[in-house]
Each structure stands twice: as structure tokens, then as C-alpha cells.
């Protein structure tokens, strides 16, 4: 099967004065359509760096990203929200837009103006934030803000979702709702790569990748088996 995106020999080293942090060490990764992949590993092991490199937020020092299938020949930084959506660990909501405007941002960027579409309202209802549509993100709880990010990412049903701890601020109920929504997208042929610290979410994954000090391995960390 053709991968949607592959990383070959991805290497990223952060330099702080004399100190070097090897956030990615020669990482090989391929993501295929129709799979939900959990990315696990200790804090500081390089999970966010990998997601950020895959979405074009950060550039690897060495290695290459190869886009396949319908995205063949593309670059991470020219993909649209309908192709690749990121749920950043730090959320990345726009403070001056309401919750409704944040969720509908991908369709606003496509030129949609005016009232929220029915799809946007349905999606916001499904993640329990419809009643917050006219509030600003800072007037919502952290969990609600995170569900706003999830809804924004899912709005255009992208081919690729890169989610960085998307349930870090959620209770068990909303964790289940969010992972069920990812599975629904995956059933339609999307791929979701999800950094998660919560082993209870592994049940939703088709595959687990573990990060250890910048090295990526297939499978769950041995110590947690
Ligand atoms: N901009 C930066 N400058 C210097 N070092 C950085 C920078 N960003 C990340 N690092 C370091 O790179 C390593 C990997 O960080 P990364 O954020 O990818 O880890 P993570 O696995 O996502 O951790 P967490 O589970 O805490 O989110 C860490 O040692 C971190 O301190
Ligand atoms: Mg992280």
C-alpha cells in the first residue's frame, strides 16, 4: 500500500549553547491510509518534534518527507486543512476569534462567510461546545478549548490528522468521544497519528509507535506490556 507520508532518516538536533538535544535520531516512519497510529513515549522523547516536522512547522536538519497517493509531490507547508490538520499540544486557538469562529476557521479560509454551517454546529454539538460558540477561547475551560481544536481539525475531514496529546485535558467521556471521532475519520480512509500519554487510548489504535530519546520503534514500550 502506498503511504500517505513517509519520513526518511529524519534528524533534528536542538542546540542550546554547548548543549545538544537529539530530539529525532534518524527516524523512519510511514503512515498509511485508514490507520490510527498511537505515538507514545516519555516526556521529552521527541513526539511533538516528530509531529511538528511532519506538518512543516519545524524543519528537520536531515532526512526527507515523501508525500504519497493523492498528495504525491506536495510539501508539508502547502497542504490545506482538508489535507492535513494539526491539533497542537499548546492548542493554538486564536484569542480574538470566538470559539465558533475558531472551529470554522478552515472553512472561512476557503471563503465561507456568515453564520456557522450546519456541519460546524453538528460537530460542535458532538464535542460538547455548541453552547460556547459566541464566547472567546479564554472564557472556556481548558478541556473545552481543546475540544474546540479537535473540532477545528476535523471540520473538513482531512486525509491526515496529526494530534499532539489531544485528550490531555479531557475526562474519560470526552476522551472516548474524541477517539471515536478519529476512528470515524479513519474508516473513511484518513490517517491519524496521535501522541498520547494515556494507555487507555491504545485500544483505539491499529498500531503503536514508541519514541525513546529521539529514536522511533514499532510497538508499545516494553516496560508497559
Ligand atoms: N525549541 C527547542 N529548543 C531546544 N530544545 C527543545 C526545543 N523543543 C524541544 N526541545 C527538546 O527536544 C526534546 C524533545 O522535545 P519534544 O517536545 O518533542 O518531546 P515530547 O515527547 O513531545 O514531550 P512531552 O511528552 O513532554 O510533550 C526535549 O528534550 C526538549 O527539551
Ligand atoms: Mg510533546
Image (cartoon, helix red, strand yellow):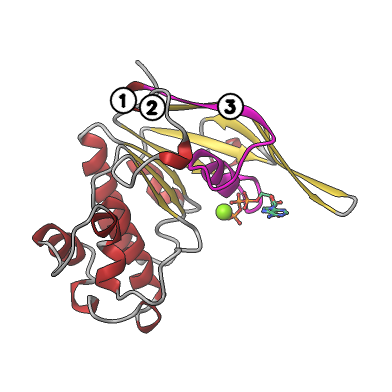
Q: Which residues are magenta?
A: 42-68
Distance CA(mark 3)–CA(mark 2): 14 Å
Nearer to the camera, 131 or 67: 67
Q: Earlier in the sequence, mark 1 or mark 2?
A: 2
Q: Earlier in the sequence, mark 3 or mark 2?
A: 2
Q: Which mark is residue 157?
A: none
The quadrant of the picture occupied by the N terminus is top left
Mark 1 and mark 3 in contact? Answer it, CB < 8 Å. no
Mark 3 and mark 2 in contact? Answer it, CB < 8 Å. no
Q: Which mark is residue 70?
A: 1
Disc 2 element: loop
Residue lying at 24% horizontally and 50% vertically, measured from the top left: 181
Q: Where does the image place residue 176, in percent across and percent down from the top left?
A: 28, 55
Report crowding for label 3: few under 14, some 14 to 19, many 20 or more residues within 10 A (C-alpha).
Answer: some
Q: Is residue 149 above or below residue 138?
A: above
Disc 3 element: strand
Distance CA(mark 1)–CA(mark 2): 8 Å
Disc 1 element: helix
Mark 1 and mark 2 in contact? Answer it, CB < 8 Å. no
Q: Which mark is residue 4?
A: 2
Residue 15 visible in the picture: yes
Q: Where does the image place residue 17, in percent across and percent down from the top left?
A: 87, 54
Disc 3 CB within 8 Å of nearest ligand 1 atom: no
Residue, disc 3: 64
Residue lying at 42% horizontally and 40% vertically, measured from the top left: 78
Q: Is residue 155 above or below residue 54?
A: below
Check if residue 66 falls in the magenta segment: yes
Nearer to the camera, 56 or 47: 56
Amino acid at each position: 500500500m502506498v503511504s500517505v507520508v513517509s519520513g526518511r532518516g529524519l534528524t533534528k538536533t536542538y542546540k542550546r549553547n554547548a548543549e545538544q538535544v537529539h530530539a529525532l535520531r534518524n527516524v523512519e516512519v510511514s503512515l498509511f491510509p485508514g490507520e490510527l497510529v498511537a505515538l507514545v513515549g516519555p516526556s521529552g522523547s521527541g513526539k511533538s518534534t516528530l509531529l511538528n516536522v511532519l506538518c512543516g512547522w519545524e524543519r528537520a536538519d536531515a532526512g526527507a518527507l515523501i508525500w504519497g497517493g493523492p498528495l504525491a509531490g506536495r510539501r508539508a507547508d502547502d497542504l490545506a486543512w482538508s489535507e492535513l490538520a494539526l491539533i497542537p499540544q499548546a492548542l493554538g486557538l486564536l484569542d480574538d476569534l470566538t470559539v465558533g469562529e475558531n472551529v470554522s476557521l478552515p472553512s472561512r479560509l476557503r471563503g465561507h462567510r456568515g453564520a456557522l454551517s450546519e456541519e460546524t454546529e453538528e460537530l460542535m454539538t458532538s464535542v460538547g461546545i455548541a453552547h460556547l460558540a459566541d464566547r472567546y477561547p479564554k472564557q472556556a475551560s481548558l478541556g473545552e478549548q481543546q475540544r474546540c481544536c479537535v473540532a477545528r481539525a476535523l471540520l473538513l475531514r482531512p486525509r491526515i490528522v496529526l494530534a499532539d496529546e489531544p485528550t490531555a485535558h479531557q475526562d474519560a467521556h470526552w476522551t472516548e468521544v474524541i477517539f471515536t471521532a478519529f476512528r470515524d475519520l479513519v474508516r473513511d480512509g484518513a490517517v491519524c497519528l496521535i501522541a498520547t500519554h494515556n494507555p487507555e487510548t491504545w485500544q483505539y489504535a491499529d498500531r503503536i509507535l514508541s519514541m525513546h530519546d529521539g529514536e522511533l520503534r514499532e510497538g508499545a514500550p516494553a516496560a508497559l506490556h
